[in-house]
Image (cartoon, helix red, strand yellow):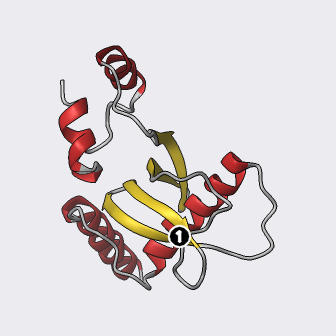
Amino acid sequence: MKTRLIAMAWLLCTAALFAKPHTPAPGTAERKAICDAMREYTIAAQKKTLAYSFLFKVEFMRVDGDYAGFQGFPVKPDGTLDDRFEDFVYTTFLRKKNGVWQVIRDLSRTDVPTDEEVRDIRKKFPADFPTAAMPQYWRKLLRP
């Protein structure tokens, strides 16, 4: 029994070490968990009470270990734009802590950041956030 537990622990550690950045497929538990975290965040940010649920049109989602990058916008269950929300694409970065995804940084915006804003974002951005989980635009912009 003890040998079995040690082998299982070794397999889990090995899998974590060699996990590659990936995009969770539609319908997977991982993708749903990230979208659920985004729904909670979006509702809180908009300070709205919603009579019906909403989905996200995901433009980018990439997971690398316990970090994820997300770009998308809310849509109604039928796929049409949801006019209850501001008209922009959410660009957020999440961390999984104790098995739960949470938004740790929101870079959603409607304009291009100034050089001063980029410097400020770099300073406040988690130093250990993997670039593989960033959309290409932000990867280029935030590289030192």
Residue at the (29%, 17%) spot, across then down: 115
Q: How many marks?
A: 1
Residue identifier under label 1: 33
Q: Name the secondary structure under disc 1.
A: helix
| Residue 21: image location, x then y, percent | 23, 61
Q: Position of residue 89 (x, y in %)?
A: 45, 53
Name the spot of residue 121 as percent of width and height, x first: 38, 25
Front-lying residue, 115 or 135: 115
Label 1 crowd bin: few (<14), some (14–19), many (20+), radius 10 Å:
some
Quick one: quadrant of the C terminus?
top left
- In front here: 101 or 82? 82
Q: Looking at the image, which residue sits at the far top?
A: 116
Residue 136, x across and y down, in percent: 20, 48
Identify the residue shown where x is 60% and y is 82%.
77
Residue 68: which quarter of the image?
bottom left
Instruction: Tell me which residue sits at (39%, 82%) in the image.
Output: 26
Q: Is residue 134 above or below residue 120?
A: below
Q: Is residue 94 above or below residue 84?
A: above
Residue depicted at 81% across the width and 73% down the height: 51
**Nearer-the-camera pick, 138 or 5:** 138
Q: Amino acid at mark 1?
A: Ala
Residue 14's quadrant in the figure? bottom left
Query: In what quadrant of the picture does the N terminus appear?
Result: bottom left
Question: Does residue 4 sit above or below 63 in this rendering?
Answer: below
Relative placement, left or right, of 26 versus 137 is right
Quarter of the rendering containing residue 127: top left
Q: Is residue 70 above or below residue 34?
A: above
